[in-house]
Amino acid sequence: MGGGRWRSVLSGVWRSIAVWAVSTVTMLVLAGLLPDFRLQSDNGDSATRIAITAAAGAGVFGLLSSLFWPLLVRLLLLVPAFVIGLLVFFLNGSLLLIALRINPSGRGEAAPETAVVVAAVMSAVASATGGALAVRDDDAYRRRLYRLADRRRRRGEGQADPSTPGTVFLQLDGVGHDVLAEATAKGLMPTVAAWLGLPTAGTRSGRGPTHVLTPWRTDWSSQTGASQLGILHGSNHDIPAFRWYEKDTHEVMVCNRPSSAAELQRRAVERTGDGGLLTVDGASRGNLFSGGADQLALVLSIAARRGRKNRSRAGYFAYFCDPANAVRTAMSLVAEVGREMGQSTLARVRKQRPRVKRGGLYPFIRAFATVVERDVVVAAVIGDMLAGRNAVYADLVGYDEVAHHSGPRSRDAAKVLERLDRSLALIAKVAEHAPRPYRVVVLSDHGQSPGETFQTRYGLSLGNLVRAGCGLPVPRRARRTHSGAEARAAVRAALRRPVEEGGEEHRPSHRRSEPVVLASGNLGLVSFPDVPHRMSKEEIGRRHPALLSTLANHPGIGFVLVRSDEHGGLVLGAHGAEIPVDALDDEHPGPLADFGPGAADAVRRTHSFPHTADIMVNSWYDPAEGEVLAFEEQIGSHGGLGGAQGRPFLLSPVAFSAPVDDGTELVGAEHLHRVFRRWLRECDGPQVPLATQADERAA
């Protein structure tokens, strides 16, 4: 055995002894503080005997945790995954009670509720001690990664490690290009700054860039469903919004509903004739769609399946099989819930504006997205890298969830960016020890635009405005619209309740003549379910003469898209503006003038979709402040045109060819898919014809 391995063994032994000693002291302290926890007999014992009892108890508890916790976590996969965090404390307490019962000293007892507290504190202290020692010993940390890599390579049945690079795509959900640039400049994301060659804390100048930052432009539907389907499967055709009504099936499609995600993926594969970006030794982690990967964890499009082939939630085991990780995550979950409650209370006391309600289950949903989902997905990505997989795509949704309710540039959202940067640093560290070189690509699927809600500003929802324009009675009591954040879908899938919250309000009314009004951020969709085809402006005018003018002239609405028997697609604006979509361009934008370059192309493309709504409504947009008006209960929104929501980022290694030529924009998720395909081929070696890049860009 070499000297390095001996040092590794000795270092591990000393860490184990230190953790055991700290756990023993912790047990002694808790025995002195808690009346229902004793380490001595009824007649009393000497201090030495009590210390021996504590040491034996701590040792048996640690041994039981190491032996039985992985088995317990595998059994926990049979129950809803979100419940794991609640059961962690109970199971740890049970292990402690068993440890006290079989303690060789024959002493020690605790009330069940006290055992839960003692076990949680001991696991947390042991985890913190072991982590602190591992951080201080960088060599030991690197050797541990080497051992993990060697172990996974041995499972490969003697196959040689691939020499070509693998690629990891990390999606920071909802982080706009400008938000990332500002966070990097403020020192909130030192890992990203280092990759860009910018000065970081403790350094006067960067060491040269390893990555390049490129903005890209989304389609009109600036949301995860459209962007991720286009990126992973090469087509987001006929995705007009986050949710829409399909007249041929009489169903509301919702991108974060498992059944809808499965159907959208099927349509994309059928349209392209290709399984997806990850079909060759790929892994999909925490995504809406699989990308054709064999290795799946927390993928929504398969969450509705039943049976052995559904491995969507198996990724929880990779993280929770370590009892210290389980306790640490559970405690972080509780801390995050408390942090959210404190922050929302402070926002109410300060009377911050804009502000939305953040009560109910939201603190737990936020904690799940920013703690549990992040930890599980990062652990899965690390496992994929140590296994040497070819391509990995993972989505981290924490920022998107917090920004919806606190604002894209809030302090709450900034804290999430700091934690995401630490996750990037960890993944970069693991890449140094993986069995093959890895190139890490970081991107976002959309940004977020700030602004108060439409209902807050005008006192009525888009649905009630439509009803008023149709001459229908408007309810006196407004109903709250639900957020379309991806984290909510992840929680519901983990709970095995794969039906979107508030689904009842999106179903067509029993009165088939009444309109179905749906919201996707600041994009609204109006459909008339009793008409089997997409209604024209002329048909709508004959049925509801005041509706289109009511919408187009409302100060909270930027423009309206309808079909016209005479002009094809027609964009309506205030003061009677009516411009055919074929006549719109960047030089003559008409009502789209405030929405920037590319808006006309985006609207024109959506107009061509088979399931575009009878009326498409985009909210008002203030280009000076970058604000929109969300038709949902969000103060940071995305889904339509206007502002930062349509300007996400791409952070790519300089080892790859440039995403686009100088002076050319990267437009649309389908374009991103073609770029990523090219990069994966570049990893295979120089045999790729150079003409391929020009051909793809021409396409």
Image (cartoon, helix red, strand yellow):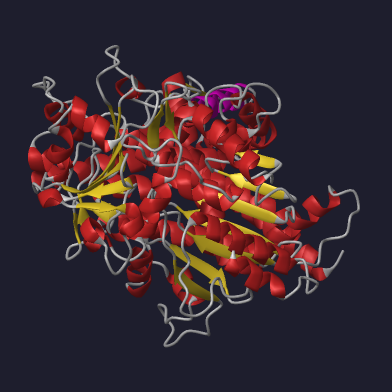
| Quarter assignment of residue 309 | top right
389 with respect to 420 (left or right): right
214 with respect to 11 (left or right): left
How many badges with numbers are in the image?
A: 0
Q: Is residue 91 magenta?
A: yes
| Quarter assignment of residue 275 | top right
Relative image position of residue 246 (x, y in whole percent):
42, 28
In front: 581, or 414? 581
Dominant SS type (magenta): helix
Picture residue at 67% right of the left edge, 67% below the top: 432
Q: Which residues are magenta?
A: 90-101
Relative image position of residue 673 (x, y in whole percent):
58, 57
Q: Is residue 633 magenta?
A: no
In the rendered image, the vertical position of residue 226 relative to residue 110, given as above or below: below
Relative image position of residue 69 (x, y in whole percent):
63, 32
Residue, far right: 158
In the rendered image, the vertical position of residue 492 relative to residue 411, given as above or below: above
Image quadrant where one finds the N terminus: bottom right
In front: 505, or 415? 505
In front: 629, or 398? 629
> Taking the image as drawn, is residue 537 in sight?
yes
In the rendered image, the vertical position of residue 245 relative to residue 16, given as above or below: above
In front: 645, or 156? 645
Picture residue at 85% right of the left edge, 49% below the top: 156
273 with respect to 664 (left or right): right
Image quadrant where one finds the C terminus: bottom right
Residue, far bottom: 204
Picture residue at 34% right of the left edge, 74% below the top: 185
Relative image position of residue 338 (x, y in whole percent):
29, 40
> Taking the image as drawn, is residue 140 in sight?
no
Picture residue at 32% right of the left edge, 31% below the top: 535
